[in-house]
Image: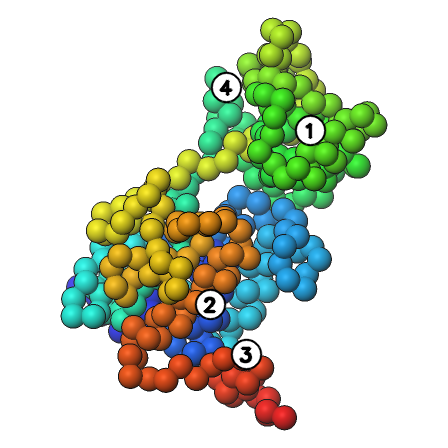
Amino acid sequence: MSETIQTEVVIVGAGPCGLFQVFELGLLGMRAHVLDSLKTPGGQCTELYPDKPIYDIPALPVCGAQELVDRLMQQIKPFEPVFHLGEEVLEVRPRERRFDVVTAAGTHFDAGAIVIAAGVGSFQPRRLGVPGCDAFEGKTLHYRVKGADEYRNKHLVIFGGGDSALDWVIEFASTAPSVTLVHRRNEFRAAPASVARMRELEAQGKLRFIEGLAEAMLTEGDAMTGVRVKASDGVMHDLRADHVFAFFGLHPKLGPVAEWGLDLERKALKVDTEKFQTNVPGIFAVGDINTYPGKKKLILSGFHEAALAAFGIQSWLYPEKKQFLQYTTTSPVMQKRLGVTAS
């Protein structure tokens, strides 16, 4: 049996909200170990859309998803978090205001508090579902954009009706020789401004929209040459494509989290809005994994949740201790870690 690691906080999930949780805990003088089933920090931002532009991060007019992760990693460096990547949490056992945490790799923790920042849980992108398409996955059929410059001068077909699909259609429309957006209906889940911009580009002839579904992959020998789409009126369209992207969202699986005795609502963890604590005292949840009245699944909202959760965790771990931090500009922890002197 491996040696048990004692820590104030275990954070389950190394996406943006989990990383920012490290920072907020650090401001209050608390250390954390961060666990994630993925091999690298960043969660969905790194795994699914590292080049996707993000527009709602304060003071950053536009920020790439991977860039955001890199900035967060730099921001938390003074607090020296310990990462355990490629390790899924299997067991959480409460005991006397502490928790025993065990990962699939056999790592054991004795933690004072737990923060679940696992996004939508263990996730996989929803597949295109066309016979034989798996042979092209990762080559010419993609469920995320990695290295956008590689596709700027290619013929592209993009499936989906959400923000990711429309963001990339708009992004590539100015450089690709042809971009076709395919969606099963004429209504979209994306932001209204993105839909309006897509319609403008369609009217200008810079992209094509087809209401329909993927029917078959087009091939020559072992190579993909395009995709056949069946439109809603029954007409078949053979579309040339150097690369095909499918943005149908994620297939979420809570996995072991569903067995930890936490209150669930539609596969999300119910929390209060004071401390973002679950029904189990000492276990908190931030980001897309939680739910409460008025919940918005925004990175910005997750950052706010992490800030309040940090105060809740401090109260849970140190009930007799006065909470000293009100303004980050007067944080003695940051002044000491960064080597600056209060003016």
As helix, strand or loop, the secondary structure at mark 4 comes to loop
Mark nearest the camera among 4 and 2 is: 2
- Which tag, 4 or 1, sits closer to the chain's start? 4
Q: Which residue is mark 3?
A: 328
- Which tag, 4 or 2, sits closer to the chain's start? 4
State the residue at coordinates (53%, 44%). 48
- Whether residue 139 is visible to the viewer of this picture, yes or no, is no
Label 4, label 2: how far apart the Cα atoms are: 44 Å
Residue kind at label 4, given as amino acid type: Val
Q: Which residue is mark 4?
A: 130
Mark 1 and mark 2 residues within 8 Å of each other at the beta carbon: no
Residue kind at label 2, given as amino acid type: Ala
State the residue at coordinates (60%, 12%). 232
- Which tag, 1 or 3, sits closer to the chain's start? 1
Which is more toward the observer, 66 or 119?
Answer: 119
Tell me if 267 is positioned left or right of 138 in this view: left
Label 2, label 3: how far apart the Cα atoms are: 11 Å
Mark 4 and mark 2 residues within 8 Å of each other at the beta carbon: no
Quadrant of the frame with the N terminus: bottom left
As helix, strand or loop, the secondary structure at mark 2 comes to helix
- Whether residue 266 is visible to the viewer of this picture, yes or no, is yes
Q: Position of residue 224 (x, y in %)?
A: 61, 22
Q: Which residue is mark 2?
A: 307
Label 4, label 1: how far apart the Cα atoms are: 17 Å
Q: How is the image coloured?
A: rainbow
Near mark 4 (Cα within 10 A), the count class, few <14, some 14-19 or many ≥20, is some
